[in-house]
């Protein structure tokens, strides 16, 4: 049997539309596939750039963290192990002679003639310090023995912290005509400038005190001089 003419025309249109749909689908499929292939590739490239940037930033942060830890470790190491051991040392300044006169051993005689004298009493001469300036308050004051030991090492080995004078030491002297003879027993010594310094753990030197050390030596004897008038400490004595 044959379909009516209008039905055959409808079927031909439907077939043509179906064929056109298939052709269009076949034509567009490669293009869609190409676009699908290109776009993901482009998307992955962008994502990779972002990932690389994040990775580089993470690496830099890690390096900074390692450097900070290394610097902190070095600081702790320097603090735990100082370069210098803290200590105190002394420096020597000017040096001048000084006499330590023994009390009750001064004699004057004249005018002219001769005089004989001797030491009739024992006496102890002690070294002492004159502190001019104390730059830093310390719990332990500086003792004369410390300074004297340091001065011995600095070139004056015959210094003593204390010197004992015993009796005896007789001495005679002729006096010029018209002059007065004077004798006084003394212990030789020095007047020495000194300064104390502290060495910090950083090896920096800080001055903590300074002054004068009056120190006897290991020598003693009479001092003799003549004068036109008897005198004591610059005052003329009423001598007849």
Image (cartoon, rainbow, N blue to C red):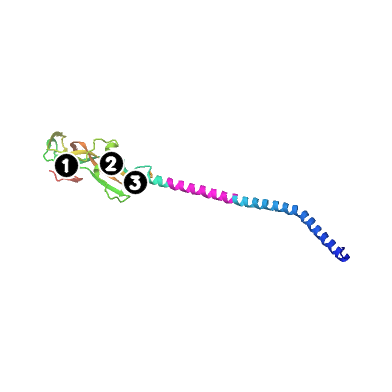
| Distance CA(mark 1)–CA(mark 3) | 33 Å
Task: Look at mark 2 in the image and give the residue it sits on.
Answer: 192
The span shown in magenta is 52-74
Name the residue located 16 percent from the left edge and 41 percent from the top edge.
124
Check whether the beta carbons of the residues at disc 1 and disc 3 lie within 8 A of each other. no
Point out residue 151 in the picture as x, y percentages from the top left corner. 28, 39
Q: Is residue 56 magenta?
A: yes
Point out residue 111 in the picture as x, y percentages from the top left corner. 14, 38
| Distance CA(mark 1)–CA(mark 2) | 20 Å
Q: Is residue 174 left or right of residue 20?
A: left
Task: Look at mark 3 in the image and give the residue it sits on.
Answer: 207
Point out residue 240 in the picture as x, y percentages from the top left corner. 12, 43
Magenta-colored segment: predominant secondary structure: helix
Looking at the image, is 5 positioned above or below residue 56? below
How many C-alpha atoms fall within 10 Å of the one at disc 2: few (<14), some, or many (≥20)?
many
Q: Nearer the viewer, residue 195 or 94?
A: 195
Where residue 222 sits, quadrant-wise, is: top left
- Work out whether mark 2 precedes mark 3 in sequence or the reverse, and give the earlier one: 2
């Amino acid at each position: 049997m044959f379909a009516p003419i209008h039905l055959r025309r409808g079927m031909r249109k439907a077939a043509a539309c179906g064929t056109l749909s298939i052709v269009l689908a076949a034509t567009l499929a490669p293009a869609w596939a190409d676009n699908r292939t290109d776009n993901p590739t482009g998307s992955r490239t962008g994502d990779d750039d972002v990932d690389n940037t994040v990775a580089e930033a993470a690496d830099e942060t890690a390096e900074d963290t390692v450097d900070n830890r290394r610097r902190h470790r070095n600081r702790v190491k320097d603090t735990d192990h100082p370069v210098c051991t803290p200590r105190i040392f002394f420096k020597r300044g000017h040096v001048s002679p000084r006499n330590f006169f023994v009390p009750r051993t001064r004699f004057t005689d004249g005018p002219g003639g001769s005089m004989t004298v001797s030491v009739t009493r024992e006496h102890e001469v002690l070294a002492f310090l004159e502190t001019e300036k104390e730059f830093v308050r310390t719990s332990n004051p500086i003792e004369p023995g410390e300074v004297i030991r340091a001065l011995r090492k600095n070139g004056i080995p015959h210094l003593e912290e204390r010197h004992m004078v015993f009796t005896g030491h007789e001495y005679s002297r002729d006096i010029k005509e018209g002059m007065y003879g004077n004798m006084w027993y003394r212990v030789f010594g020095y007047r020495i400038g000194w300064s104390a310094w502290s060495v910090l753990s950083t090896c920096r030197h800080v001055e903590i005190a300074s002054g004068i050390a009056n120190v006897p030596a290991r020598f003693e004897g009479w001092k003799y001089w003549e004068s036109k008038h008897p005198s004591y400490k610059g005052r003329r004595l009423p001598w007849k």
